[in-house]
Image (cartoon, grey):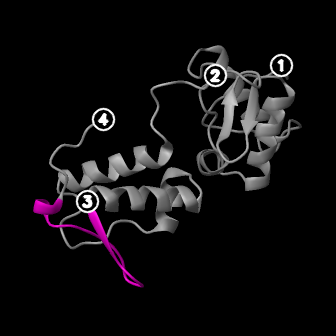
Amino acid sequence: MYGFVYNPSVLDREGPVPIYKQVAELVRDQIERGELKAGDPVPSEAALERDYEIARTTARRVARELREQGLAYTVQGEGTFVGQPGTPRSPRKLPLYQKIAEEVAESIQRGEIPPNRAISGEKVMMRQYGVAKVTARQAVAHLREQGWVFTVPYRGTYVNEPEKWPTNRGS
């Protein structure tokens, strides 16, 4: 589109094409290659910020650029998705907080976080998974409801003893 080949690992930060347009072009390439399909979520602002080392405002401009190109639409509070407004979102996908909770539970099961040891705090989860604070809180609440963890006010959230873990994990 701008006469040069995009390399996902390198953005031309000194060139004439604005960074947000370069990142939007990388996402467009993913859509054209079929890596992102109609209804799939576009990487979140936090994920773009982390992956491309860009400012949050630049990441917002990426989403706006994709919308202006007719490649994506945004649902307030849920994210930006590939396709036109009204395109059904991809089925079979767990809410992000459940995916995060599942990943933490798997780490607990593998013994990477032993009983009575703290799991990552909200700020670390927000950075690690590129999510908002509310999503990190939902993930922790989900883990607590399932019995994987318990929270000590003003101290943190800790892994429960194995006998308190859920017996059937379900999918």
Which of the marked residues, 1 or 2, is nearer the chain's N terminus? Answer: 1
**Nearer the N terminus, badge 2 or badge 4?**
2
SS of the residue under disc 1: loop
Tell me the magenta residue range: 149-164
Query: Residue sitting at 30 percent across and 35 percent down?
Result: 171
Marked residue nearer the N-terminal end (3 or 1) = 1
Tally of marks: 4
Q: Residues within 10 Å of mark 2 (few under 14, many from 20)?
A: few
Residue at image mark 3: 148
What residue is shown with label 2?
88
Which mark is drawn over residue 171? 4
Query: Which label number is shown at residue 1?
Result: 1
Q: Where is residue 54 in the image (x, y as percent from the top left)?
A: 71, 51
In this view of the protein, can residue 162 be seen by the observer?
yes
Nearest the eye: 44 or 6: 44
From the top left corner, tell me how far across and down residue 40 is, in percent.
Answer: 59, 27
Amino acid under disc 4:
Ser
How far apart marks 4 and 3 lie (CA) works out to 16 Å
Q: Is mark 2 on a helix, strand or loop?
A: loop
Disc 3 to disc 1, C-alpha distance: 49 Å
Question: Residue 153 lies in magenta, yes or no?
Answer: yes
Looking at the picture, how far across and down is residue 15, in whole percent?
A: 84, 39
- Say which amino acid is labelled 2: Pro
